[in-house]
Image (spheres, grey):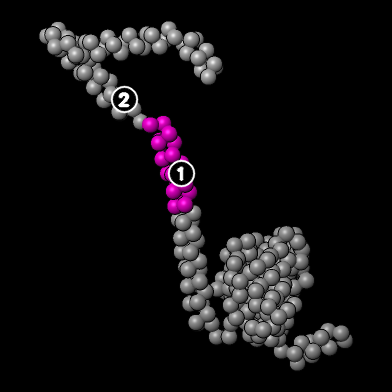
Amino acid sequence: MKRFALFLLQIKEYIILSFLVIVSLFLIFSNDNSQIRFFRAVAITTLGTFQSGLSVIPNVFEIENENKFLRESNIRLSVELAALKEIKIENQRLKKLLNFKSVFPYSLISAKIVNKSLIQSRNTLTINVGESEGVKVGMPVITDDGLVGRVISTSNGYSIVQIILNKDLKISVKNQRSRVDGILSFDGTSNLTVMNVRKNADVNEGDIFVTSDYSSNFPSGIPVGIVSESGNLDNLFKKIILTPLVNFELLEEVFVLQILPDKEKLELEKYFNKK
């Protein structure tokens, strides 16, 4: 109580001033004199104008809250738009794959890539189908663009695919236009080459190589790559470099062909090569 009394004593001048102002205003507005009426009219007009001016000044806190709401809404819409674009792209890709599957002459198992290695000399993919879906070691793997590789290991629900960018994989191929044969090989760094092609063979840049009839592991006619460089390696053979038709960096889905290599042919060739 003493503190309150001391506080009142400290501001007594302001209290007295406020009281006198209130009394003055009361006396002014209670007076019906013409000059006082004019003063009241001017005061009211001025006060109304001032309030109108204040009303057009936006509330800072309301603007901040509104901006926050708009930013959050913009983020949600951006995420939804990105998701819709991704769905559209995936639908277009799957539609293309389904059309390919409907016209391909072999039974196919659809698979999604769950892991990939593309920076080594022995590159592989991991796909989400395995023995429970009928996948077996040795089955070829393709897309609608061309050859991917072959299955080298399986579990119940997953498989490892040895891709053509793997130095351990050798494939018999032929030039689709000139029918020139060769052996596809990855050099372990960056080049996909066709070996054992004679110097005078008809091979030009832009030609497409496909799997050949001599391949023991793949059906013939599957596109592999397009010639990006064709020149002379030495006095006997050509230097042929291919660009894969499959874009492995963007690859997301593949097909496993439900066919296996001809064991009789493989055994015969293996026996012959040992002699």
For image coordinates 47% across by 46% down, the residue present is: 72
> Is residue 77 positioned above or below 263 on the image?
above
Q: Residue 27 placed where, x, y %?
A: 23, 10
Q: Which residue ends up furthest to the front in the rendered image?
A: 1
Membership of 157 in magenta stretch: no
Residue at the extreme bottom = 264
- Mark 1 and mark 2 residues within 8 Å of each other at the beta carbon: no
- Tell whether 208 sits left or right of 73: right
In the rendered structure, find residue 163 and report the number of the disc placed on it. none
Q: Is residue 272 left or right of residue 15?
A: right
Residue at coordinates 79% horizontally, 89% vertically from top-left?
267
Q: Main secondary structure of the magenta part?
A: helix
In the image, what residue occupies the spot 42% across and 10% down?
14
Please name the amino acid that badge 2 sits on: Leu
Q: Which residue is mark 2?
A: 54
Quarter of the image with the C terminus in it? bottom right
1 vs 2, front mark: 2
Residue position marked by numbered label 1 in the rendering: 71
Q: Secondary structure at mark 1?
A: helix
Determine the image quadrant of residue 155: bottom right
Nearer-N-terminus badge (1/2)? 2
Label 1 CA crowd tier, 10 Å (few <14, some 14–19, many 20+): few
Measured in 3D between alpha carbons, the distance from the residue under mark 1 to the one under mark 2, in whole angstroms, is 27 Å
